[in-house]
Each structure stands twice: as C-alpha cells, then as structure tokens.
Image: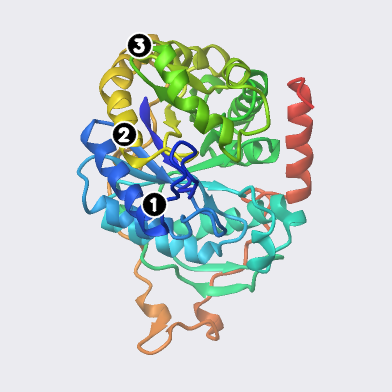
Amino acid sequence: MQFGLFTVADVTTDPTTGKTPSEYQRIKAQVEIGKLADQVGLDVIAYGQHHNPPFVASSPTTTMAYVAAQTENILLSTATTLITTTDPVRIAEDYATLQHLTDGRMDLMLGRGNTGPVYPWFGKDIRKGIELAIENYDLLHRLWREDVVNWEGNFRTPLHGFTSTPRPLDGVAPFVWHGSIRSPEIAEQAAYYGDGFFSNHIFWPASHTKAMVSLYRRRYEHYGHGAAHQAIVGLGGQAYIAPTSQQAVREFRPYFDNAPVYGGGPSLEDFTEQTPLVVGSPQQVIEKVLGFRDYVGDYQRQLFLMDHAGLPLPTVLKQIELLGTEVVPVLRKEFAALKPADVPDAPTHRSLVEAAGGPHESIDTTPRTDRWTGTRAEDANHLEPANHLEPANHLDPANHLDRATAGLSQEGNH
C-alpha cells in the first residue's frame, strides 16, 4: 500500500492573516513539501497540472524533476496530467525523459481536468473531452510501446514513421493511473488497458466512489487482466490533523469556511460526515481511512490533499510530519494485515521490469533514419503497415462510451 500526498498548487489567501502567498512562494513550497514527504517516509508525491489562476502548476514535469533531484526514495507522480489538452507526443517525450532522470522513480495519472476555459486555450472543444481522452491515450499507449508508429485520428495531425524519444527506461513504459471524479468512461478506459484507476474521492459520498470503483473492477476482470479484487485502485482524501479533534476543528474551520471549494456549502461537520474529509486526531484519521476499504475493497494507493485553502507552509509541513510519523505507520500495518495474499501491490518501475522478464533495449531504428531529419516519413519502404484501426487492439470510442455508461447504470448510480 502506497501512502502520499497530492497537490494542485493553488494560490489562496490565508483567511486568518489576510496574506496571499506569491507565485514564487507557492512554487518553492511544492519543493519543500516533496522533500519533507520523502524524509518522513511517505511513498508518493503527486503534482497537479493547471493552466489558469489561481494555480501555479502549469509545468509538473519541471517540478517533479527538481524534487526528484533533492529526494532519495519518494515516487514522483501527477495529479493529474491533462490528456485532453496536452499533445500525447509531448507527454510521451516529457515523461519518458523524467523516467530516465529519476531512474524509474515516477508514474503519472491522466485526467481531463475540471476547468472548462482551458480547452479552447489549447485549441480543443470541451464537448469532446471524453473522445479526446480516449483517442489521445490510444496514441500515448502506442508511442511508449512501438518503436515506429503510424497513426491517424480525429484530433491531431497523423504520424507517419514516428519514433518518440527517448524510449522508455529499460524498455518498460511508465505506469499510468486514470483519474476521474464522475466519468464512468474513464473507469472503463482504465479497465480496458489494465491500468490503474484513481478515484479523486474528495467531494463525493461513499456511495458514488463505491459505484465507480466497482465498475472499474468488474470491467478489469472482463478484459482478462485478473480478478476484480486484484484491480489497481487509488483513492484521494483530505485530512487536517491535530493532537485532539477539538483543536483540529478550531484550527481548520476558518480555512474550510472561506476556501473557494468549500465556502457557502455544507458546514464543516456535515462535510466531514458526508465525504472523505477528516478533521481530527491521528486516531480519527486512521479510523476513517481504514473505513474506505469497507466500500472499495483492498486498494493500492492513498493520497491526501493537505496544502490547500490558504494553509501556510509551516502548518502544512507540520501536517505532513503528523501524517508520516503518527498516521501512516499505523495505516500501513493495518492495511497489510487485512490484504489477501493474491492482491498485488501498487506497480513500480522495478516490478514492471521484473514482470517483463528484465530490462531490454528498444529496437534499433537506425536503418529508418538519415543523419539530418531522423525518421524518413517519405520513404514508404521503411514504414510499417498502418494498423491503427484494428478493433482487436484499439477502442471504438462509440462502443466504449456505451459500455461504460451502461456499466455504471448497472451499479445503480445514474
């Protein structure tokens, strides 16, 4: 079981002081958070991607590489990488480079994002968000597994004889999680490829998360990747920790009441009762998180959002210390005792390389290139036959959406 943090790098005014951190301060804070998470023994730090104020998370790979260079053990991930508005070729190149720089100490979570105006900024239509996610990941998946790709789709220019560089470290692609709050199509997509499914699990009741994870597990088994209870599941969560519940509620209430994502909605007490948010003592956090297993089954990754709503950096760092020293050690022990032997751990680069039979080099593509332009797209003799429409290997978007929607309906959550 992996435990860690995820952050979206929001720039929010501290309601208790009226001070707003600068972009510089928030960017630097992301580094300090990652370093301390490593020091206290957390497994994962995941950085978000946003392209609009009040966020400063437009370049997660830059931050991840910088943090990786200053940490020893923690795995760098994303929360999320925008598969809809980021070119799959760019993702393939950036994250393969990061994979080499970190010696495989990374993975990534793909998502569609939750900010509508971003789509036209990158020349995309939000009404095509699901179709973009499906098609772009089909291409990304192939770019990491095929040395020479011939591809044609609806949302970007075709590729002819294209080789994405660098090739994945040890010939093994980074592990991918598909993150979603409410889209059954994304759970279906994760199941189809045998990838991980990450339920954001922040603002929604347990019944919704249960339905989404159940759909993913059932479809994971349907596609032949293993039994439903062996599917790779991750959850988000939010916590504010203090020695006593009274102190935790007193300290966190002004942040909850004034945060853009909370303010004007349910009370703090109602929100903690109806969602995964927990504000309390270390023991209260432990008990609530252990309860997640009751409705999603055994899962592999638990990430906490702790640096949001205007909380100052010293407070966030104290929260990370409490999480890493008083909460996670107990959770790690309890979850391990409950997990059946046939439920896999979260994939890592090392485990994926072992499953592939060891490291291997990519196919030498030198005969397909010349010294000036690289791959010669114009040389037909050097191109592999186009196979991007083979139904056995690729998703039919229309059927894919129908299956996913029908699947969630069968779970009783419309």
Amino acid at dot 3: Glu
Classify 10 Å Cα crowding around label 1: few (below 14), some (14-19), many (20 and above): many
**Taking 248 as reference, is 321 above or below it?**
below
Please tell me which residue lies in front, 132 or 226: 132
Amino acid at dot 2: Asp
**Taking 321 as reference, is 169 above or below it?**
below
**Which of the marked residues, 2 or 3, is nearer the chain's N terminus?**
2
Q: Position of residue 149 (x, y in %)?
A: 52, 67
Q: Position of residue 363 (x, y in %)?
A: 36, 64
Task: Say which element carries label 3.
Answer: helix
**Quarter of the figure with the N terminus:** top left
Q: Which residue is mark 1?
A: 26
Q: CA distance from mark 3 to mark 1?
A: 34 Å
Task: Say which element carries label 2.
Answer: loop
State left or right for residue 312 relative to residue 154.
left
Q: CA distance from mark 2 to mark 3?
A: 16 Å
Amino acid at dot 1: Arg
> Is residue 231 in sight in this rendering?
no
Residue 43, numbered label: 2
**Which of the marked residues, 3 or 1, is nearer the chain's N terminus?**
1
Q: Position of residue 361 (x, y in %)?
A: 30, 59
**Taking 41 as reference, is 325 above or below it?**
above
Q: Position of residue 339 (x, y in %)?
A: 40, 14
- Residue at image location 30% in from the left, 30% down from the top: 318
State left or right for residue 99 relative to residue 238.
left
> Is residue 314 in sight in this rendering?
yes
Residue 334, numbered label: 3
- Residue at image location 36% in from the left, 29% down from the top: 2
**Taking 138 as reference, is 286 above or below it?**
above
Task: Say which element carries label 1.
Answer: helix
Classify 10 Å Cα crowding around label 2: few (below 14), some (14-19), many (20 and above): many
